[in-house]
C-alpha cells in the first residue's frame, strides 16, 4: 500500500459515517467563536480509529474528530480525553491544534465529537522523509526528537493533567491491558506469535521506572504536521492513546521505526541511514536522553518488544472493527495485512532481547 496516496487528502463522507450536517452547523454557530457558514463536510482518508472530518467554510477550515458509531470496545475512542490533553498542552505552547469545543451530546451528530483548527503544513507518511536532502532529513529528525522530549519534560500536575492517568506501574498495566484486549477481541481471531508474546511479556516485566509523564501513545512522523518550508513540528495529532505513563516506553514506541523494515508502516530497517542523513538509532536515543536528563534507557529492548506487540494489538483491534463493520478507514484491510509480519518481527525481537 502506498501510504502517502492512501492517506493524503479527503474524500466524500462514507455512507456509514454521515450525519446531520445542518445540526452540526447549528452547534458550530453556537459554540465556535467566529464561525460562519455555509458549511461543507468531507472525510479525511487517513485515520483508523476515530473518524476525522474536514469542515470548510468561506472564511476558515476546521477539523472534527468523533467517536465512531456502532459497537465499540469499552474505554476506546475517548474523544473527551483527546480534547482535554490538547487543551492543556496548547495552553503551554506545545504544538497541537487549537481546540474550539467538545460536544458530548449524542443527539447532535450521533456520537461525541470535538472541533479544532485545521493546521496548515504537510504530513509525512514515510519515516525516510522522501524528497528531502540529507541535511533537511537530519533537521526533521531532530525536530521530532525535540518535540517528544518537550512533551516528556512537562510536570503533569503543573499543567492541569495530574489526574490524566494512574501514576506508577504503567508498563505492567499496559502489558495486561493490551494482552486482555488482544485475547478478548474474539471477532479478530488469534495469531501464534501474538499468543507467545503475551506469555513472554508477562514473565519479563521490568522494574517500574517511577517516572510518570504525559505520553502521546502513538508518536510517529505521520501523526505530526510539519511546516511546509522549515524542519519544524507545527502540530502533533491523534491523542486518543495519550495518558500518564512511562515516557521511556512512549519514546521507544517512536523508535520502532528503526526496527521495522521499509514498507512496514514507517520502517527504516535496511536503509542506508548515513546516506539519507538520518541519525542512527543509538544517536537518536542519545539525543533524547540528553534532552530529558537521562543517562540511558535500561529497559529499551523489553520496551521495544512490548511496543511492537502493542502495535500488533492495535492492528488486531482494527481487524476486529473490520469484522464488526465499523472500521473508519477505507484501507483497513491493507493495514490488517501487516499484523502477521509485525507479530513475527516482535517475536524475533523478544528472542534476541537483552534483559
Image: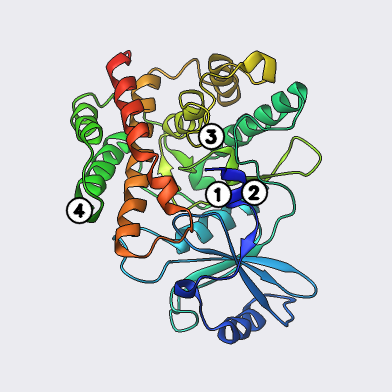
Residue at the front extreme? Answer: 1
Of residue 4 and residue 52, the one placed in the foreground of this image is 4
State left or right for residue 249 relative to residue 206. right
- How far apart marks 4 and 2 lie (CA) works out to 42 Å
Q: Which residue is mark 2?
A: 92
- How far apart marks 2 and 3 lie (CA) works out to 29 Å
State left or right for residue 323 relative to residue 284. left
Residue 19 x/y as whole percent: 51, 79
Dot placed on the residue nearer the N-terminal end, 1 or 2:
2
Query: Given this view, does label 1 or label 4 mark the residue nearer the observer?
Result: 4
Query: At numbered mark 4, what does the secondary structure look like: helix, strand or loop?
Result: helix
- How far apart marks 4 and 3 lie (CA) works out to 28 Å
Mark sitting on residue 332: none
Mark sitting on residue 159: 1
Q: Which residue is mark 3?
A: 266
Of residue 108 and residue 288, the one placed in the foreground of this image is 108
> Residue at image x 50%, y 57%?
82
- Quadrant housing residue 115: bottom right
> Residue at image x 69%, y 60%?
118
Residue 116 x/y as whole percent: 63, 63
Q: Which residue is mark 4?
A: 186
Of residue 16 and residue 222, the one placed in the foreground of this image is 16
Amino acid at each position: 500500500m502506498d501510504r502517502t496516496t492512501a492517506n493524503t487528502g479527503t474524500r466524500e463522507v462514507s455512507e456509514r459515517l454521515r450525519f446531520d450536517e445542518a445540526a452540526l452547523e447549528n452547534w458550530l454557530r453556537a459554540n465556535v467563536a467566529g464561525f460562519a457558514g455555509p458549511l461543507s463536510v468531507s472525510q479525511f482518508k487517513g485515520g483508523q480509529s476515530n473518524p476525522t472530518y474536514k469542515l470548510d467554510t468561506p472564511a476558515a477550515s476546521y477539523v472534527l474528530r468523533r467517536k465512531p458509531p456502532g459497537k465499540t470496545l469499552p474505554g476506546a475512542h475517548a474523544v473527551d480525553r483527546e480534547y482535554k490533553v490538547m487543551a492543556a498542552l496548547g495552553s503551554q505552547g506545545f504544538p497541537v491544534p487549537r481546540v474550539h469545543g467538545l460536544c458530548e451530546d449524542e443527539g447532535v451528530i450521533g456520537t461525541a465529537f470535538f472541533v479544532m483548527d485545521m493546521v496548515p503544513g504537510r504530513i509525512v507518511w514515510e519515516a525516510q522523509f522522501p524528497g528531502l536532502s540529507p541535511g533537511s532529513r537530519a533537521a526533521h529528525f531532530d525536530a521530532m526528537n525535540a518535540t517528544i522530549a518537550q512533551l516528556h519534560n512537562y510536570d503533569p500536575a503543573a499543567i492541569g493533567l495530574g489526574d490524566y492517568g494512574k501514576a506508577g506501574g504503567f508498563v505492567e498495566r499496559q502489558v495486561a491491558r493490551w494482552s486482555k484486549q488482544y485475547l478478548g477481541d474474539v471477532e479478530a481471531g488469534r495469531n501464534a506469535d501474538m499468543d507467545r508474546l503475551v506469555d513472554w511479556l508477562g514473565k519479563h516485566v521490568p522494574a517500574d521506572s517511577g517516572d510518570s509523564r504525559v505520553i502521546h501513545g502513538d508518536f510517529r512522523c505521520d501523526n505530526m504536521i510539519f511546516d511546509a518550508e522549515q524542519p519544524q513540528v507545527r502540530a502533533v495529532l491523534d491523542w486518543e492513546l495519550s495518558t500518564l505513563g512511562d515516557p521511556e516506553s512512549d519514546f521507544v514506541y517512536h523508535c520502532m521505526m528503526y526496527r521495522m523494515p521499509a514498507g512496514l508502516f514507517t520502517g527504516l530497517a535496511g536503509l542506508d541511514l548515513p546516506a539519507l542523513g538520518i541519525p542512527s538509532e543509538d544517536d537518536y536515543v542519545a539525543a533524547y536522553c540528553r534532552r530529558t536528563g537521562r543517562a540511558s534507557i535500561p529497559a529499551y529492548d523489553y520496551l521495544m518488544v512490548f511496543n511492537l506487540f502493542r502495535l500488533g494489538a492495535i492492528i488486531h483491534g482494527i481487524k476486529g472493527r473490520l469484522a464488526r463493520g465499523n472500521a473508519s478507514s477505507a484501507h483497513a484491510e491493507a493495514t490488517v495485512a501487516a499484523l502477521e509480519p509485525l507479530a513475527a518481527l516482535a517475536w524475533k525481537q523478544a528472542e534476541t532481547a537483552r534483559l
